[in-house]
Amino acid sequence: NAGVMQNPRHLVRRRGQEARLRCSPMKGHSHVYWYRQLPEEGLKFMVYLQKENIIDESGMPKERFSAEFPKEGPSILRIQQVVRGDSAAYFCASSHGDQPQHFGDGTRLSIL
Amino acid sequence: DAKTTQPPSMDCAEGRAANLPCNHSTISGNEYVYWYRQIHSQGPQYIIHGLKNNETNEMASLIITEDRKSSTLILPHATLRDTAVYYCIVGGGNQFYFGTGTSLTVIP
């Protein structure tokens, strides 16, 4: 009964590179959410997806960030041309319908 | 952006009940109250949620006032492993607005 799985747990990138963060939701969950957490702050909502559809991306930066949740495979959060300010913990959550969200343990992204 | 207000920190003696308050005066009729906690920057852990009635599960109890403008999370017998940041969230299930939460320290 695996929970939400995120990988990698830690990711180091140099400025200008691309970062890809993966999230496999809990079995039976078709709703995926991405959040970002800066040090000493609460989580900030980024995007909400269902299979093959972006439902709400109001928290996503307009440039360089994109997310997908394909019919098969994990959800991907993609950050192009990373900058120092992208360093953060990125958490994924999943839910079944309007049930509570369950979170993974996050990906810590560090930009050199 | 958070629609809740929580004290920034609290202490609780080990074995005693921890009562964590939350104000959510702008809550709307169809919004639930959710409680999560985060330990050592792990992913937030779901604790409990409710709409109007008080709720209890194996982890905690949730007391919601009749006007729904505030609630209290109760950990009946706090242990050292309950030391964490506790977040009170109101919402309809899509976007969760996390404030800075309450940092609970359980003291031996």
Image (cartoon, coloured by chain):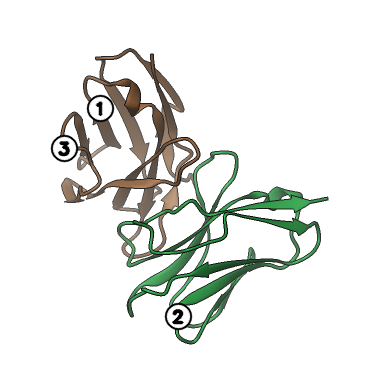
Chain colours: A brown, B green
Q: How far apart are marks 2 and 1 (CA)?
A: 40 Å
- Tell me the quadrant of the picture where the N terminus of chain B can be found: bottom left
Measured from the top left, where is residue A108 in percent x and y? Answer: 44, 28
Which residue is drawn at the image coordinates 39% and 49% (left, top)? A27
Mark positioned earlier in the residue sequence (3 or 1): 3
- SS at circle 2: loop
Three-letter code for the amino acid on which mark 1 is drawn: Ile
Judge if badges 2 and 3 mark residues of a common chain: no
Horizontally, residue B61 falls left or right of residue A78, namely: right
Horizontally, residue B94 falls left or right of residue B19, namely: left
Three-letter code for the amino acid on which mark 2 is drawn: Arg
Chain ID at mark 3: A
Measured from the top left, where is residue A102 in percent x and y? Answer: 44, 52
Is A46 drawn above or below residue B50 in the view shown? above
Which residue is drawn at the image coordinates 57% and 54% (left, top)? B8
- SS at circle 1: strand
Q: Nearer the viewer, mark 2 or mark 1?
A: 2
Residue under numbered circle 1: A79
Is B16 drawn above or below residue A58 in the view shown? below
Chain ID at mark 2: B
Residue under numbered circle 3: A62
Three-letter code for the amino acid on which mark 3 is drawn: Lys
**Residue B74 falls in image quadrant:** bottom right
Horizontally, residue A12 falls left or right of residue B18, namely: left
**Residue A37 falls in image quadrant:** top left
Q: Which of marks 3 and 1 is in front?
A: 3
Q: Mark 3, residues whose alpha carbon is within 10 Å: few (<14), some, or many (≥20)?
A: few
Q: Mark 1, residues whose alpha carbon is within 10 Å: few (<14), some, or many (≥20)?
A: many
Label 1 near label 3: C-beta < 8 Å?
A: no
Which residue is drawn at the image coordinates 63% and 63% (left, top)? B59
**Residue A65 falls in image quadrant:** top left
